[in-house]
């Protein structure tokens, strides 16, 4: 069994495997612009974040009913559990569905039907984080937050994703202030393709508690020192970074340098159906490409639970951390 870990950066829509996409397309009478699953997989040659997002939003056309979202989440949880995921904080993108006429109620009810039995079925505890699309307006984000109010007992926090460059965090100041008033935790993608300045802005203007990606902080030594001092977790996604051409190869990933700088980094899969692997595959990838030691792998697993939003269940966090310490690496 792989090392126990929490997954903190995972877009549920990014777990849509080609086989499930075609099955849902058939069920829902949706015609996809690909002959078959091989042709779809062939299209997964991305030149940057935008080229991925175009395909990712397009394929969501097959997700129409609550059952579709339940099946999507079930399939993810089963795969994640097999790779050692014990706790998952799952992003979803309501605006990508409401814009297509799928009500937010359908999305949340479908996802929670799966999450409600995830622990019993898969041994995975879960949280939901609702993301706003940063290339849409702040007004649209605020309307999304309002539409989610009946479900706030099921939503742990808010996030910010989609096309980064040209959409700085400050655009969403009021939305994040409102989210804080509602008692929601706050995270944001920053420093994936965008500059280190967006990481600072996410901390200072949005008050985020974790940075998703954050790779580009390495351009700014003062920012690195601050992130280390304040123990701000960074949710890294190494296979994603290669597939979206943020870096050339896994061997170029700054993960080791980030650990050496004292940063609280975690390893996650982002959109595993598109980027060549789930959480365990990302751990294996950086282990092999960067020559990580067992101590370093254990540190990454420990960090994932330390960075998770389990403050309301400290006993559970302690149990998971004990599993990490007791884990025996093979070979
Ligand atoms: N939405 C899904 N995956 C994303 C990523 N890697 N960056 C920004 N938005 C996303
Ligand atoms: Zn992401």
Image (cartoon, rainbow, N blue to C red):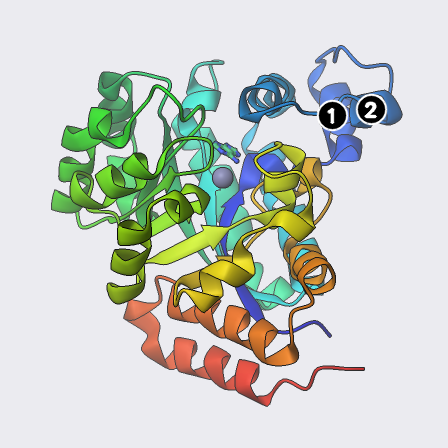
Q: CA distance from mark 2 to mark 1?
A: 7 Å
Label of residue 42 in the image? 2
The residue shown at (80%, 28%) is 41
Residue 202 percent location from the top left of the image: 26, 40
Q: Write down the quadrant of residue 303 in the picture.
A: bottom left
Q: Which element type, helix, strand or loop, lies under badge 2?
A: helix
Can residue 144 be seen here?
A: yes
The residue shown at (41%, 64%) is 261
Above-or-below relation of 47 to 117: above
Judge from the rendering whether residue 86 lies leftward or rightward of residue 109; answer left or right.
right
The residue that disc 1 covers is: 45
Above-or-below relation of 221 to 167: below
Image quadrant occupied by the C terminus: bottom right
Can residue 209 be seen here?
A: no
The residue shown at (31%, 41%) is 199
Q: Write down the quadrant of residue 242 in the picture.
A: top right
């Amino acid at each position: 069994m792989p090392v126990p870990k929490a997954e903190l950066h995972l877009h549920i829509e990014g777990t849509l495997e080609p086989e499930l996409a075609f099955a849902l397309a058939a069920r829902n009478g949706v015609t996809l612009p690909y002959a078959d699953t091989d042709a779809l997989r062939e299209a997964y040659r991305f030149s940057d974040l935008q080229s991925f997002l175009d395909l990712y939003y397009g394929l969501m056309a097959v997700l129409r009913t609550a059952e579709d979202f339940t099946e999507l989440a079930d399939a993810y949880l089963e795969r994640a559990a097999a790779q050692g995921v014990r706790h998952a904080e799952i992003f979803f993108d309501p605006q990508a569905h409401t814009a297509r006429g799928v009500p937010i109620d359908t999305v949340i009810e479908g996802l929670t039907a799966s999450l409600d039995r995830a622990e019993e079925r898969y041994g995975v505890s879960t949280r939901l984080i609702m993301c706003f699309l940063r290339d849409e307006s702040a007004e649209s984000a605020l309307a999304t937050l309002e539409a989610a109010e009946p479900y706030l007992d099921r939503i742990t926090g808010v996030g910010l994703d989609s096309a980064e460059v040209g959409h700085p965090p400050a655009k969403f100041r009021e939305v994040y202030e409102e989210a804080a008033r509602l008692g929601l935790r706050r995270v944001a993608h920053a420093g994936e393709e965008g500059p280190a300045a967006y990481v600072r802005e996410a901390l200072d203007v949005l008050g985020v508690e974790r940075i998703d990606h954050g790779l580009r902080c390495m351009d700014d030594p003062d920012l690195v020192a601050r992130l280390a001092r304040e123990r701000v977790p960074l949710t890294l996604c190494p296979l994603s970074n290669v597939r979206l051409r943020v870096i050339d190869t896994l061997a170029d990933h700054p993960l080791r340098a980030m650990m050496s700088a004292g940063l609280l980094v975690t390893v996650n899969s982002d959109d595993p159906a598109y980027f060549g692997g789930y959480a365990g595959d990302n751990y294996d990838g950086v282990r092999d490409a960067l020559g990580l030691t067992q101590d370093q792998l254990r540190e990454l697993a420990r960090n994932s639970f330390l960075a998770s939003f389990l403050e309301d269940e400290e006993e559970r966090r302690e149990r998971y951390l004990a599993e990490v310490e007791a884990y025996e690496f093979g070979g």
